[in-house]
């Protein structure tokens, strides 16, 4: 049966199309531009960028849950979304005019943090714009259209970069001009694609503020944290998510920088990453459709196993052809593991507290990728071998798989208990109704 999105669902998906352009920029051209402006620090460019990425995700880990808790209050989601969106867009635009590597890293941390915080609110909107039975496919469509939609500005950015790139023999544009155009183009695309959601979003699920909004946010967050600790299936899922999605985001953040350190041509790396986006589009949609027939938990497990193999394969990369194979493999599973994880989590949490829970989700996800990028950068820095740093990712995926297996068992037990409680309640109501009917009959007799 054909899946048709509603207007609210399409507006929500448009933001994925917009913010994915920024994601693609910071994982492809940013490492290349940063290496150019790093000067004397160019030999350690990957390490510094890895540390900066870790700092940005640590900021999100600290701020995300609080903003998510505040966003659950009536009318707060769109206000917080607007603030972090504009911060990220402006930061992205200004990045193109920064010529010193330290200031570049500072602004990079600010814009990437704002981008990730916007996703905390955006992900929590999922329960406002669609129904529970449509969560898997809507989430998949968001990632799928985000991947293919981001290709349009990215291709234009690559054209601008090629007009600068000296190694290709063209060099029509000066470096500073090319860099400014790339960042301005991405910022404009990000903002334009945000407008449908920005103007028309309606928050349907919320909690009441019993005091000052910020104070209520902190109080609700504390209550939610205590609930998560006591709720085994949610806690186990978040721990599993911490490890396997940590590896996914680390690969996304450092793929181009890793390829560049291995001596691969930058233009070929960009084309390979574009192929990843193109492959990810049909893969996310097809595997999302597969969720009608196969439980999402099995799709997530399959993706974790695939990523374990990808991370092992990456250790032994020696040629650009092998990097292309890696890029295609990542594209097949990247959207599905992100989309299925988001919708799976949305199903096991209270819908009216989605902001708080997705704030914690981001701590264990993008916020927790502090661990992956930090470990890769640290091990590479100590050993002097990037492949040694990449090897740690296989360990993260293995731990994530084991924890996710136990999380699914806990979810099933929780569902069985809930169904049993509902049956008992129904039987009690039926027995009570029958008792009342007999009492009335006896009274009439």
Image (cartoon, rainbow, N blue to C red):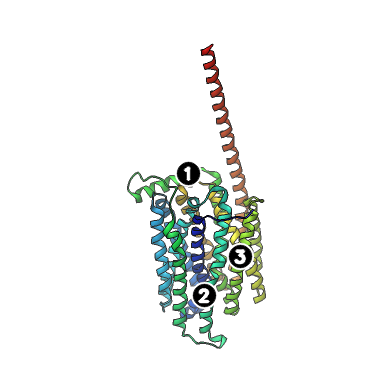
Q: Give the camera-side residue of 287 and 264.
A: 287
Could you tell me if residue 82 is visible in this image?
A: yes
State the image quarter where residue 300 is shown. bottom right
Q: State which mark lies toward you, 2 or 1.
A: 2
Instruction: Indicate whether 16 appears above or below 167.
Output: above
* Residue named by callout 1: 227
What is the secondary structure assignment of the residue under circle 1? Answer: helix
**Which type of secondary structure does the marked residue at label 3 adopt?**
helix
Q: Secondary structure at mark 2?
A: helix
Tell me which residue sits at (52%, 17%) in the image.
440
Residue 150 image label: none
Which residue does the numbered mark 2 point to in the structure image? 29
- Sequence order check: which comes first, mark 3 or mark 1? 1
Of badges 3 and 1, nearer the viewer stands 3
User: Label 3: which residue?
Assistant: 280
Q: Does the rendering let one see residue 391?
A: no
């Amino acid at each position: 049966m054909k899946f048709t999105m509603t207007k609210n669902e399409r507006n929500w998906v448009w933001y994925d199309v917009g913010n994915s352009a920024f994601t693609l920029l910071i994982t492809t051209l940013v490492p290349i531009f940063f290496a150019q402006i790093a000067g004397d620090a160019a030999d350690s460019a990957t390490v510094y960028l890895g540390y900066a990425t870790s700092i940005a995700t640590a900021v999100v880990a600290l701020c995300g849950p609080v903003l998510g808790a505040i966003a659950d209050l009536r009318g707060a989601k769109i206000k917080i979304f607007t603030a972090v969106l504009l911060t990220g867009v402006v930061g992205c635009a200004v990045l193109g005019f920064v010529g010193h590597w330290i200031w570049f890293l500072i602004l990079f941390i600010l814009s990437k943090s704002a981008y990730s915080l916007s996703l905390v609110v955006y992900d929590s909107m999922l329960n406002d714009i669609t129904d529970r039975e449509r969560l898997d496919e809507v989430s998949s469509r968001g990632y799928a259209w985000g991947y293919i939609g981001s290709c349009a500005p990215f291709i234009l950015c690559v054209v601008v970069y090629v007009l600068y790139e000296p190694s290709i023999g063209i060099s029509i544009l000066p470096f500073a001009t090319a860099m400014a155009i790339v960042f301005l183009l991405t910022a404009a695309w990000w903002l334009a694609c945000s407008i449908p959601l920005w103007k028309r979003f309606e928050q349907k699920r919320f909690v009441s503020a019993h005091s000052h909004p910020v104070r209520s946010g902190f109080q609700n967050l504390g209550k939610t944290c205590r609930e998560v600790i006591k709720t085994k299936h949610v806690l186990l899922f978040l721990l599993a998510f911490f490890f396997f999605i940590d590896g996914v985001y680390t690969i996304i953040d450092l793929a181009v920088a890793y390829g560049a350190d291995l001596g691969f041509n930058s233009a070929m790396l960009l084309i390979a990453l574009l192929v990843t986006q193109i492959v990810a589009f049909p893969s996310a949609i097809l595997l999302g459709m597969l969720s009608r027939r196969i439980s999402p938990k099995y799709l997530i497990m399959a993706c974790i196993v695939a990523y374990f193999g990808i991370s092992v394969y990456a250790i032994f990369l020696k040629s650009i052809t092998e990097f292309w194979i890696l890029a295609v493999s990542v594209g097949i599973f990247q959207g599905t593991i992100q989309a299925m994880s988001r919708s799976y989590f949305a199903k096991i949490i209270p819908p009216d507290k989605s902001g708080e829970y997705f704030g914690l989700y981001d701590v264990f996800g993008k916020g927790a990728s502090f661990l992956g990028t930090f470990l890769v950068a640290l091990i590479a820095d100590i050993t002097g071998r990037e492949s040694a740093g990449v090897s740690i990712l296989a360990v993260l995926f293995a731990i994530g798989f084991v924890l996710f297996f136990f999380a699914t068992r806990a979810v099933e037990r929780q569902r069985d208990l809930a169904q049993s409680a509902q049956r008992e309640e129904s039987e009690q109501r039926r027995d009570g109704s029958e008792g009342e009917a007999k009492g009335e009959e006896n009274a009439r007799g």
